[in-house]
Image: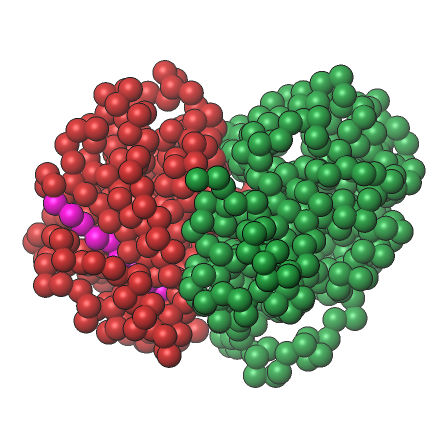
Amino acid sequence: MSKARVVVTGIGIFCGAGKDIAEFTEALSNGRSGIAPLDLFDTSPFPAKIGCQIKAYRPEDYFKPTELKKLSRADQFGLIAAEQALSGSDALKHYSPWEAGVCMGAGAAGMFQSEVWLKELLKGIKASPSLLRGLLPDRTTTEIAERFRICGYQSSITTACSSSATAIGWGADLIRNGQMKCMLVGGSDTLSLLTFAGFNSLKVVDSTPCSPFSLGRQGISLGEGAACLVLEDETTALERGATIYGSIHGYGIAGEAFHMTAPEPTGSTACRVMRAAMRMAEVTQEQIGWVNAHGTGTPLNDVVESNAIKMVFGEQAGKVPLISTKAMTGHCLGAAGAIEALATLIALKAGFIPQTLNFRGKDPECNLDYCHHQKKTSDAELAISNSFAFGGNITSLVVGK
Amino acid sequence: MINNFKNIVVSGYAAITPAGVGVEAVLQCLQNDTTTLTDVPVEISSGHAAKWARAEYFKASDYIAPMKARKMDRSSQFATATAGLAIKHAAIDIKSLDAERIGITMGCGFGGIGNSAEMLTGFLTSGMEGAAPLLFPNTVSNAAASNASIEHGLKGPNLTQVQRFCSAESALLNACRFIEEGRADIMLAGGIDELNALMMTGLIAAGQHRRYAQAFGEGCGMLVLESVASARQRGATVLATINTVRSVGLLPPDIKEQGARELLGDLSAVNKITLSGTVTDDDCLMKRLPKCEHINTAAVNGRSLAMGATAMAVLVASLTDSQSGRHIAASPQGPYYAIDFHGATSA
């Protein structure tokens, strides 16, 4: 039996660079970054005081007070993005509740609220236990499942910065292999003191907006947000007249088994995962138009990823742009893979390759085409979106328009 | 969702739980009707009635080089040690195999929450000087699986799931599908939970000592799953086959009966059932179960989010030739799993 082609029939996004698809598309197209000074928490203890926070966010504009008591910031973002994707798709009307599932990638989850609980506990103050409700990273998935009556399957993938890319790949495979008819996939994550202090303690946060693949880059800019995709098999989606936003052709996944924070220096595992993704997608490297890099802006990661691209594409590597949208969205950790997969889908469909912002100079070790100076027009049909994570967890998605 | 598998065998298992090292320690407690649960000390419980079970005897340095163990959080120590025992039980010599074809999936409860709390406490009390960089890498939920993969050189698929009381079952489904799709030949599939005083304080503050955390535990269980071809090639002892993994995401009250029927399927040939997560609290599921042997490892080690891995290892260990075992797991607000194992002696 031939496997189904998996298409995207709904998209939603809520992040610092755009609170809906239109805003995000405009930012992606015009190279508008959401990285700015943070006001979510006191940044005075930190060397870096910027990030891509969702500014002017009023939860009460989206949720009732009773709902807000049990929703973490990450749950809220996830629900908002899911609502956008599902309402645009209309898919759930066409399936029984058992035929649809949800799989979200998560990271710090409700840590932002739980930190308040711990802070009060340390002061000897009894804090509201509702602050702990969203601590488990599976909460967003369950909230989405309950709100939209998605009963077939629920899971939450927690592989740090590759979580939501894996959620997309996994969800697509469940449809491709006939296990599910419709999957809501994506990721949600928020800024928190734990992650902000943690990355600062490792001295990998740039005090100015991150500049992936540039000379003199100092590290990441953190971000937050959520992105969701509705996945269906192409035949059924076309039969019901769904709008097709793109396709998920396959994914590769592996652990480097090297180090908890440092990437394997040759890039061989990243190369292997990209090749596996193309093999699972049944496409060749010649069909890949460009790559949306993990591209954090840390000195080591960007070199390793560039090396991996050279191994994958050989002599053609210089003709396959390797771009990073993190200078626009910040590094959204558990949501990064979904936000970047969505950016890839949007750009493929619109026929351009996004610019990598904040160029500071040419790094001799990063000697590929990073679209540092401007976006490029492109008629590419396929692109790869890479996600690397603490622990050496690597996921590569093959995305089509 | 129904996943039928014809190609997946269990070739090893291991557990480190409050009952002791090894699945046999849990079986022994079950046979003797003993428990490791004790009252939570009053300075933690503030006088509330709650029980817990901790593997206080566990010394990571018995299994991992002390310098490496010191860099790991407690969950990672459990997982790395258990993975080593599972690999040994399955008689896997990783150096003689393609490590890129051997992966790991873990269900993870609160993960290295103790590690995260320590890092945060340092920051909240002493600012950036108190934020220890050594602690931060292990604050991620995938630290346990990743540290285990680093220690044992597992370069295949690597994934962590957190899905309430079905975290381990969710990870097992990933592992099965990775083998079925040809992404791996051998997968370690496990579940890890740690329990500490701060967690118990939080659970009690949230009122969970009156609900799902009346008796909470910690530990790690792991199964070694393998394709039939791989098991044959290396002459592995096959302990069981995995035939079917059924899952339902959510059982809303108005369609719960229908969903329960779909989840449980035909139970007529089942000899033994392990009950995991909150399934014993769910009358709709419990009333459908046949009067065969029911095994509830929570009675020994307490309940925990990824307890299912230990329960599945216990089920496999207790199956004799040709017996059918069903592992059933539930979470409040879903998901739900029903996983069929069949006792076997050769590939």
Q: Which chain is green?
A: A
Q: In this view, does A324 lie to the left or right of A170?
A: right
Which of the two residues, A126 or A372, is positioned nearer the viewer here? A372
Does A71 appear above or below B136? below
For the C terminus of chain B, the image quarter is top left
Report the residue that reaches farthest toward the left: B32
Which of the two residues, A25 or A159, is positioned nearer the viewer here? A25
Which region is colored magenta? B323-331
Image quadrant where residue B125 sits: bottom right
The residue positioned 31% from the left and 41% from the top of the image is B5
* Residue B79 placement (x, y as % from top left): 38, 41
Q: Is residue B27 left or right of residue A158?
A: left
* One can see residue B304 in this view: no
Q: Which chain is red?
A: B
Which of the two residues, A133 or A77, is positioned nearer the viewer here? A77
Does B121 appear above or below B185? below
Image quadrant where residue A314 sits: top right
* One can see residue B97 in this view: yes
* Residue A42 placement (x, y as % from top left): 74, 63
* Residue B266 placement (x, y as % from top left): 20, 58
The residue positioned 19% from the left and 43% from the top of the image is B342
